[in-house]
Amino acid sequence: MDTKNSTAAGSTPAAADTKPILEVDGVTLQYKTKEHLITATYRVGFDVYPADRFVLLGPSGCGKSTLLKGIAGYMKPVEGAIRLKGREISDPGPDRVMVFQEFDQLLPWKTVKQNITFALQNGGKSSSAAEANDIAMEYIQKVKLSGFEDTYPHMLSGGMKQRVAIARGMAMEPDVLLMDEPFAALDALTRLQMQKELLQLWEDTHFTVLFVTHSIEEALIVGSRILVLSPHPGQVKAELNAFDLNHENVGSKEFVRVQQRIHDMLFADRVLEDEIQAGDKG
Amino acid sequence: MSKIPDVLVRPEFEASDIGKASTADVARKLTLMERISDMNSVRKLSILVIVIVAWEIYSQVSGVSELVLPKFSATAWALVDAVFSEKLLYMVWNSITVLITGYAIGIVIATLLTTAAATTRFGSDILSTLTAMLNPLPAIALLPLALLWFGLGADAIIFTLLHSVIWPVALNAHVGFMSVSDTQRMVGRNYGLRGIVYVVKLLIPAAFPQILMGLKIGWSYAWRTLIAAELVFGGSISDTSEGASGGLGWFIFASQMDLRIAYVFAGLFMVILVGVVVETVVFNKIESLTVRKWGMQAR
C-alpha cells in the first residue's frame, strides 16, 4: 500500500536510458492551519520523464495540489527532495509554469496578449518586445483565440480564460507544465473540448505536463501515466499506464476496467463516512 | 407486464427543418426615445432642472426674505458677478493649490506607511493602531492645535489636510494589498518577480481598485476639511494670485458677514461644482481608463 508498485514496467514509453526530468523523492509536505499542522503528503515518490502526461489522481485531501505547489517551489518539503533535471528545487521559477484552476490567474489589467508577453519578458524568455509579441501571437493562434488578443480577461468565458492560461504556460516552454485541476471549474461540455485540445497541443510538441485531477475519467483521458494517491495523508497507492486510453475509447471494456480498478483502489478500504465526505467535497 | 409506468411516455420527435424564425425581432434598433431615456446624464439633469424650478417658484411665490433664501436667478447672477468682478475663480484656485499640496504630501506619507505595513508585521501593527485611533477624529478638530504649531496660514490648513488624507488612503491601500488573491501572487512569483518589481508590476495593479477608492475618499475628505478650515481661518491664506485674498471657504464666510446671501449661495454652488467635477470627471476618467476597462471595479 505504501510501496511503489512497478506494474508493467516494460511497457513504459520512456526508453531505459532516458533520465527523468523531474524526480520526487520521498517527499513529506506539511502546512499549518490556524489550529492544526496538516501533513498533506507522506513520503511520496515518483519520476516524470520527458513527454510524459503525468497525472496525480486522488480524492480530496490526498495532497495532490499541495504536491504540485511543492514542485512549483511555493512550499518546501519537510522530508525528501524534489529535483528538476537533477537540480534541487528551492524557489518558484519560470522553468516550471503553473496553470491554476482559478480564473483569476490571468492578470485582469492586461489583455490576452499582454498576459503572455508579460510572462515571457519577466520570466526572461524573450528579451525584446517584438519577439515576445511574435511568440504570444503564435500561441494565441495555437489555442484558437486569434482575434481575442487585445481583449481583457473579464470579457472572456471560463474556457477561453483557461485557454489563455495554457497558452501562457506553453509559451514559456517550461521544463514541465504544472496543471492544477485546470478544467475543474468548467462546464462538462467545455471540459471535454479542453481535454481534446490539450491532447492535440501535446501531439504538436510533446511537452512534459504534470496534471492534477480528482476525476478518474479525466485522468485516463488526459494522462499517459497515472499516480494514484490515497488521502489523509497523501501516499502513493499505485502508478499506472494510461497512454492507450483516450476520448475514443471512453466506455470501452478496457477503459471501464481500469476505471473500476482505480475506483476500487481508492474506495475499497474506506468506511462509509469517508466516502460521503469525499463525495461532498469532490 | 401491464404495470402502469410512473412517467407518461410520449413519442420522441426530431424537427426535420426548423427554418428561420420569421416573426420575432431577433435584434431591433432601440428607438430614439428609448435611447435618450437610457442616458444617465439626461435623467439626472432633468432632476436638477426640477429642483431649480421648484426653488425659483417657491422663492417667488412665498415672498420669503432674500436674507433667508435668495431666488435662484439672484444666486445665478451673484455667481456670474463673483466670477467676473470679485475674482472668485482665483479664490477657487487658491483653495485648490492648498488642497493639492496637502493631498500630494498626504499620499507620499500614506505610501510610506503602507509600504511599512506590507513588509513588516510591526509596520502593519503601527498602521492599524494609528488608523483605528486617528481615523474617527475629524480633521477640523485638529485646526486649533495646527494654528498653535504652524501659525495662522496655509501650513496649518495643510497639516489638517494631511490628517484627512493619510488614513483613508493608507488603510484602503493596505486592505487592497492584503486582498490580492493567492493565485495572482503565485502567478507573479512563478514568472520570477521579486521585491520592488513584484510590488510595482503585480501588487499595485492587482490592488488598484482599492487604492483608487482610498484616493477618492481621501480627496473628498480633504475637500470638505479645506472648506471648513477656510470658513474659519481662510482669510489668512493671502499670498494670493492677482490680489484675490483667501480661498473659497473664506469667500462664503465673508459674504455672510456682509449679508450678501446670494453670494453665500453662489459660493456653496462653487464648492459643489468643484467637488462634482473632480469626483465625476477626474476620478471617473481614471476609473474608465483602468478598473472599469479591466473589469475590476469594486462593487
Image (tube, rainbow, N blue to C red):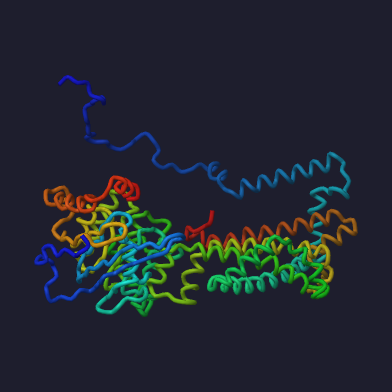
Picture layout, residue A190 above or below residue B162: above
Residue at 51% from the left image edge and 69% from the top image edge: B204
Tell whether B180 sits left or right of B279. left
Residue at 27% from the left image edge and 37% from the top image edge: B19
Q: Would you say residue B255 is visible in this rendering? A: yes
| Residue A103: percent from left, percent from top | 39, 58
* Residue situated in front as seen by the camera: B116 or A156: B116
Picture layout, residue B55 above or below residue A12: above
Q: Would you say residue A199 is visible in this rendering? A: no
Residue at 79% from the left image edge and 41% from the top image edge: B57
* Residue situated in front as seen by the camera: B27 or A47: A47
| Residue A138: percent from left, percent from top | 29, 68
Residue at 36% from the left image edge and 73% from the top image edge: A92
Furthest toward the top, the residue is B2
* Residue situated in front as seen by the camera: B127 or B82: B127
How many marks the image carries: the answer is: 0
| Residue A188: percent from left, percent from top | 29, 48
Tell whether A98 sits left or right of B60. left
Tell whether B78 sits left or right of B272. right
| Residue B99: percent from left, percent from top | 71, 68
Furthest toward the left, the residue is A10
Picture layout, residue B113 above or below residue A235: below
Q: Answer with the quarter of the image where residue A91 lies.
A: bottom left
Which quarter shows the N terminus of chain A? Answer: bottom left
Furthest toward the right, the residue is B258
Tell whether A249 sits left or right of A196. left
Q: Answer with the quarter of the image where residue A171 lies.
A: bottom left
